[in-house]
Image (cartoon, helix red, strand yellow):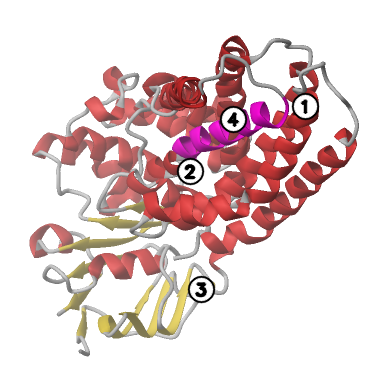
Amino acid sequence: MERTVAVESRPASGAGEPAIELRSLRRDFGDRTALGGISARVEPGENLAVLGPNGSGKSTLLRILAGLLRPSGGEIAVLGCALPKETHLLRGRIGYLGHAPLLYRDLSPRENLSLAAALHGLDPAASASRIQSLLEGVGMAARGGDRVAELSTGMKQRVDICRAVLHEPELLLLDEPDAHLDTEARALVEPLIGAGSGRTRVVVSHDRESATAGADLVLELR
Amino acid sequence: MSPFSALLRKDLRVELRTLRSLPAMALFAVSAFVIFRFGLDRTTLDGELAAGVLVPTLLFAALLAINRLFVAEQEEGGFDLIRLAPIDRTVLFAAKASALVIYLVALELIAVPIFALFFLNSVSGLLPFALVLLLANIGLAATGTVISTIATMSSARDLLAPLILLPLLIPLVIAAAGAGEHLLAAGGPDYGGFGKWLALLGLYDLVFLLVGYATFDFLLED
């Protein structure tokens, strides 16, 4: 089954190196086509909202952009790296927030963030103060020593957002970033992952209103 | 902190906090010794029978840890965390294999003295046998880490790991039991052929460490 895609707001331009460029991107799972013939271009600093109903391939697209999933066809360039061939050059430059948090349940938020900092080669002293400031920023400093398993879903989401931005990524790939957050928590994470964060963002959502707020482009998967 | 140290510390910290693998391994080994004691109706063992009971018991106990080795990575997003980080993925192989060696040494510190208490008249062969066990641990950890990774990617993890792993471990069991037969002999340790078995264990370790190093990156691909 071939899926269709619509890109709104701005036609593709040829000037400068884009942050993301997709040409006829396709991903199949066996006989099923999850993504078919998607083309889009996102300039540095722009915000792309990816919309669509359940099962339309939004999360699959995000995983392909993060280099976590191989495309079945088409051409993809993310931050100047041709995927999947140059995925290794992309590592460490992306802040990825998936459906499920990338956090170890039996470690504390602080331990999880310290592990992420070590994996990204951050200086331990500098990362310790950044971790503290991020946890304070999202209102999680007081729970920073508790096991992640003991936190609510929204609290895990806040810690995972800290993990995604810890290494100051150039590109944010966010899968339903507001899904488990209340109004207060949304305001707390806004400076880190919101449209005003100054980073190129791809935000996946099935909620048109929240995803398109501050979006420069809208990619609609059907 | 290096990514290797961070990943190894994470595994050891989680094991110390949850005690999911080590107590089960130790309990399995002790239960097996009790069963052997009554099943064989012997209060003392030596030579090939002693090695034939001890080495396979440790091996089967190790399977419990091998089966659980990548559960957290699979269920809590650890694989994605590694894939997104700018590190050589073989660091994960090295950290997991090192953690497994530490678990096995801890198991042996508990199980071997109990085995000696149950079955051995003389413990003079245990010190040189510790070297045999150390080499066997390295081979078991290298092979177990590779096979556990493959099994984790499959839906039949619990079945696949022992099915693939046990045949691969036959040379290691032959060498460890062969060395043990002479070291645990009734009249005290006999060093004839000791070097040959150590060399075989060393070669096994080298081959599977290289196999792990060469293949691990591909095993983590989607």
Q: Amino acid at mark 4?
A: Val
Q: In the figure, B95 relative to A78: above or below?
A: above
As drawn, the label of residue A84 is: 3
Front in this rendered view, residue A151 or A121? A151
Q: Hey, what amino acid is under mark 1?
A: Leu
Q: Is residue B43 left or right of residue A213?
A: right
Name the secondary structure under disc 2: loop
Give the residue drawn at x 43%, y 56%: B160
Same chain under badges 3 and 1? The reply is no
Q: Residue at x 20, y 86 (%)?
A: A3
- Residue assigned mark 1: B131
- Percent x, y for residue A109? 35, 28
Count residues near mark 1 (Cα–Cα under 10 Å), then give few for <14, some for 14-19, many for 20+.
few
Amino acid at pointer 3: Pro
Residue on which the image places disc 2: A167
Mark closer to the observer (4, 1): 4
Q: Position of residue A183 (x, y in %)?
A: 9, 39
| Left or right: residue B155 compared with residue B12 | left
